Image: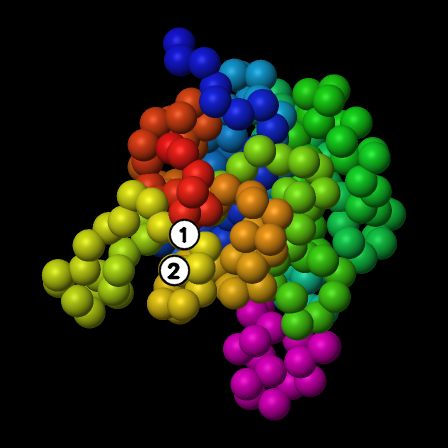
């Protein structure tokens, strides 16, 4: 069994991932699949934190474009991430992974409030921790929340789990000549406006030299392969950083 490259990670999952082949909501098969992928990394002894988006239920930016107040829309989106987090917690615990959900908006009847020291203690005790409700502030995406929480818990890497196998130099859907990049710098992502994460999240990762790996979660075993250091997906890093 290969040894893990990282001791503590934060994985960012989009809400759309939970839909599977559905157009809305949570697909039970997909959430159980994700729980299995997380369990495979948990079994390596890696400390795991997760952030999940809410786009499978509600997307604040879209709602605001139809006239809803942006702050109200973003608060609804934050609550959607809590729904997803509780669902994933249930799936993980059914697989024997002790899990805690911490929310940036206090709702003590269903989850713990986000407290950094408590989160780190959970990780040290071998519990998976899911950070819900984004940063607790409107106008910030869950990508930014993931970059922020990764820094706060001193994660060694931010894993951006998507439905594509990495970052391309153009949109592969519309450009057949688009090429996948194994490595790209933070500045390249920002300058070329590569839409893998929002610019605030990329800037935060760059300022703190947090490596980001973008990979396809839908390929079974990929999460474990990335954690074990295999060359999967695309790595976002400093230009001077060694592989």
Residue extending farthest to the left is 177
Q: Which quarter of the figure has residue 129? A: top right
Cβ–Cβ below 8 Å for labels 2 and 1? yes
Reply above or below: 8 against 80. Answer: above
Dot label at residue 185: 1
- Quick one: quadrant of the C terminus? top left
* Residue 143 coordinates in the image, percent (x, y): 56, 56
Q: Is residue 71 magenta?
A: yes
- Residue 125 in view: yes
The residue positioned 40% from the left and 26% from the top of the image is: 229
Residue located 45% across and 55% down the image: 186
Image check: 131 left or right of 22?
Answer: right
**Residue found farthest to the front:** 240
Q: Give percent across and percent down for residue 84.
A: 61, 50
- Tell me the magenta residue range: 53-73
Residue farthest along the bottom direction in this orientation:
67
Residue that numbered label 2 is attached to = 188
Is 20 or 132 nearer to us in this picture?
Answer: 132
Measuring 80% from the left and 40% from the top, which residue is drawn there?
116
Q: Position of residue 70 (x, y in %)?
A: 67, 80
Vertical arrangement, residue 21 with respect to residue 200, above or below: above
Residue furthest out toward the top: 1
């Amino acid at each position: 069994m290969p040894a893990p490259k990282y001791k503590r990670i934060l994985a960012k999952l989009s809400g759309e991932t939970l839909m599977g082949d559905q157009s809305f909501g949570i697909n039970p098969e997909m959430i159980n699949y994700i729980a299995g992928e997380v369990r495979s990394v948990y079994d390596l002894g890696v400390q795991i934190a997760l952030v999940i988006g809410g786009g499978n239920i509600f997307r604040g930016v879209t709602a605001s474009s139809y006239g809803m107040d942006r702050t109200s829309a973003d608060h609804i989106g934050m609550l959607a991430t809590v729904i997803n987090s509780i669902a994933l917690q249930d799936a993980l615990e059914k697989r024997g992974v002790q899990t805690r959900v911490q929310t940036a908006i206090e709702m003590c009847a269903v989850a713990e409030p986000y407290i950094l020291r408590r989160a780190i203690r959970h990780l040290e005790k071998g519990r998976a921790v899911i950070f819900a409700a984004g940063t607790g502030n409107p106008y910030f995406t869950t990508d930014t929340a993931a970059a922020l929480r990764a820094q706060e818990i001193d994660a060694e890497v931010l894993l951006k789990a998507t439905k594509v196998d990495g970052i391309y130099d153009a949109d592969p859907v519309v450009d057949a000549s688009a090429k996948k990049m194994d490595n790209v710098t933070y500045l390249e992502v920002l300058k070329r406006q590569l839409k893998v994460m929002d610019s605030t999240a990329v800037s935060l990762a760059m300022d703190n030299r947090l490596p980001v790996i973008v990979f396809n979660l839908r390929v079974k075993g990929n999460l474990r392969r990335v954690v074990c250091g295999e060359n999967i997906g695309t790595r976002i890093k400093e230009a001077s950083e060694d592989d």
